[in-house]
Amino acid sequence: MNASLYLLTVLIWGTTWIAIKLQLGEVAIPVSVFYRFALAGLLLWGALVVMGKLQRLDRRGHLLCLGQGLCLFCLNFLCFYTATQWIPSGLISVVFSAATIWNAINARIWFGTPISSRVVLGGVFGLAGLLLLFWPELATREASHETWLGLGLALLGTLCFSTGNMLSSAQQRIGIRPLTGNAYGMLYGSALLLAGCVASGQSFAFDTSLTYVGALLYLAVIGSVVGFTAYLTLVGRMGPARAAYCTVLFPVVALTISSFVEGYQWTATSLCGLALVMGGNVLVFARLPRRRAAQAA
């Protein structure tokens, strides 16, 4: 079951980056994110109500879902969508794979999970790999400011994503199932986005083109309802650190698509950078299952 959830998450989230890219254009970024999670939240909440599987939440549960909505279905995607304007979507997925390290650090802060020296070493590998991947853009004077801004936003979005993982883990520790947590979290996140859009005077114009509508439906139904449910189920089953290990495989899928759709050019430097990022993540978690087995014994 866990292997199937891993594969499903990797295939879905490895392809959502290009769908995000396709949404850029006529519709403002915060409005696009609002449309995505309002649609996903309403579909999931309605389905759970019809099936009689929507859990009742107390005040603590609603606060956890509110925090999850802010971090996981609002702020992080505002960062990712904005970063996609300036750097290839495949490179954003590489930055996103740093969630493994963020989750290890946050698990220590939130739940007291020890951090080994391999996490530190893996972080060094990952940062070195990111530098190599972005070196062609960073070395170009006229694009350096936008590239740095895109990189910073992608890193901030990954930190928000990791914080949302911790909140989902806290939900499941008190008995809130991922489907219910996601339904309320998406609705809270979309409500926060709506409030922000209204306060900032954003236009709610809608792009009726087949490209935009197709990308919206894919991101809302497949990327959000199915993808987040599969991933956060793994968070509950395996813990946030091990669940985030599947993000190591996202860049392979995303950069492959980016090379065909966005014209991303592979070089010896970028291949070395990708290898370092993935190697750093593997280094962080390669021995974790063995350690768990030893503790269980």
Image: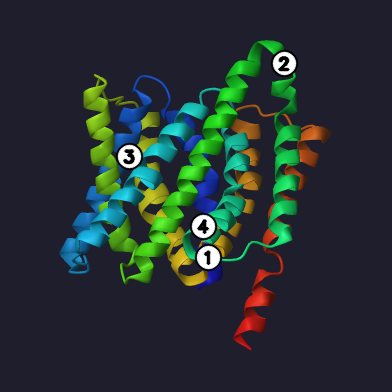
Q: Nearer the viewer, residue 226 or 61?
A: 61
Name the N-terminal-most of marks 2 and 1.
Answer: 1
Cα distance in 3D space between marks 3 and 2? 34 Å
**Image quadrant for the C terminus?**
bottom right
Look at 58% across and 64% down and name the residue there: 242
Q: Check if mark 2's residue and mark 1's residue have beta carbons within 8 Å.
A: no
Rendered view: 153 above or below 167: above
Three-letter amino acid code at the position of disc 4: Ile
Marks 3, 4: nearer the viewer: 4
Rendered view: 240 above or below 275: below
Cα distance in 3D space between marks 3 and 1? 34 Å
Image-based side of 188 in relation to 16, left or right? left
Cα distance in 3D space between marks 1 and 4? 6 Å
Q: Which mark is residue 36?
A: 3
x and y percentages locating residue 286 in the rendered image: 71, 65
Image-based side of 37 in relation to 255, left or right? left
Name the N-terminal-most of marks 3 and 2.
Answer: 3
Characterize the local packing of mark 4: few (<14), some (14-19) or many (20 or more) Cα atoms within 10 angstroms.
Answer: few
x and y percentages locating residue 293 in the rendered image: 64, 81
Image-based side of 17 in relation to 50, left or right? right
Q: Check if mark 1's residue and mark 4's residue have beta carbons within 8 Å.
A: no
Residue identified by numbered label 4: 109
Cα distance in 3D space between marks 4 and 2? 38 Å
Residue 227 makes an appearance in the image: no
